[in-house]
Image (cartoon, rainbow, N blue to C red):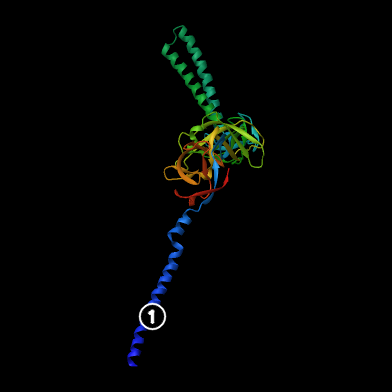
Amino acid sequence: MMALNIKNLAIVPACLLALILVSCGEKKDKIKAPGTGSNRSKLSNEALPAEGFIVKARALAENISVPGTLLPFETTDIRPEISGRVVEINIPEGQMAQKGLLLVRLFDEDLQAQLKKLEVQLSIAQKTAERQNELLKINGISQQEYDLSELSVNNLKADIELVKVDIAKTQIRAPYHGRIGLRNISPGAYVTPADILTTISQVDNLKLEFTVPEKYSASMRPGKTVKFTIDGMNQEFTATVQAAATIIESNTRSLKVRGIVKSNHPDLVPGGFAKVLLQMGKNDQSLVIPTQAVIPQARDKRVILYHGGAVEFKVVATGLRDSSFIEIADGLKAGDTVITTALLAIRPESRISLTKVE
């Protein structure tokens, strides 16, 4: 009886070991089942849905919009040339002024008195020169004495001209026909050349100033026509490029351009904001694709070509572009099909199923 019990006890560990091995084998089969080679192959062969576009030729124009500012054709700060006290003000604020209109007059009575004194001296000197000329004819005086009298006359004439110039500086006049700004002085004020009395702007003609990105700088040549619009107006205006800056601004990598506005519309006010519309290029037979089909790389640009379910990554050179399409200058031909969606999920070995072709 004792021997039988010992034998039974020896069988129990063997049964437990068999049960453990069978259980582990089942778990391994369960873990292996989802990732078997056949299943992975099946998954890799599943086609990725995507949309395509057939490359074709069409007219394409590259249009950009940049902000601009309307400027007066000329604008000048009116300052006195000399210091003095204001005795007369005739500044028509906000109104048009003719060229030469007296705007401000400074105190000049001291200069006027000096002018009268010199004029009296000149009169006496001229009479003295006339008498000495008569004496010279009869050898009553020497030639040198007569020359000195003539020199005195000429010196007085020069002094009179200098005083007249100083008197003219006390009269500040409009340098050209234009609109006068606000006055910054009052009667009796003492002004210096550093003070701005008012401003004048030539608003009969206007200028348009705007900037373009560096890559378009070569096309901004004098004579080029640009269009612009003003907020609140449905009308388009035109301007002709007059000149461009000689250097590109290093901070913004842009070029400043200035043009002359052709039309003189009353609603065009200097300082107003303008939306400048520029056509930088046009090609009536451009090979185009949607802009989203281009994949930018560090050194080039690529597209994904579709070939009967397979794909090919192709390097391309681009040209003109607008808001929807981009020109392909090299790398594609008419009739090629490019992928336009799911670009980030596609790999060189991917299979593609086109759901839509434009």
Query: Which residue sits furthest left?
Result: 3
In this orientation, does residue 259 appear? Answer: yes
Q: Residue 25: which quarter of the image?
A: bottom left
Name the residue at 47% across, 54% down. Answer: 44
Q: Nearer the viewer, residue 22 or 58?
A: 22
Kind of residue indicated by mark 1? Cys
Q: For the C terminus, which image quadrant? A: top right
In this orientation, does residue 281 appear? Answer: no
Residue 153 vertical placement versus 40 (above, below): above
Q: Nearer the viewer, residue 190 or 262?
A: 262
Query: At which x and y percent is residue 59?
Result: 57, 34
Query: At which x and y percent is residue 276?
Result: 58, 38
Q: Nearer the viewer, residue 217 or 121?
A: 217
Residue 252 vertical placement versus 173 (above, below): below
Query: At which x and y percent is residue 231?
Result: 64, 42
Crowd class of label 1 (few under 14; some 14 to 19; many from 20; radius 10 Å): few
Q: Residue 268: which quarter of the image?
A: top right
Number of callouts: 1
Residue 142 vertical placement versus 103 (above, below): above
Q: Secondary structure at mark 1?
A: helix
Q: Residue 315: which quarter of the image?
A: top left
Residue 268 lies left or right of residue 131; in this view the side is: right
Q: For the N terminus, which image quadrant? A: bottom left
Residue 31 lies left or right of residue 94; in this view the side is: left
Residue with the mark numbered 1: 15
Residue 13 lies left or right of residue 233; in this view the side is: left
Query: At which x and y percent is residue 90?
Result: 63, 35
Q: Nearer the viewer, residue 36 or 94?
A: 36
Query: Which residue sits furthest bottom?
Result: 1
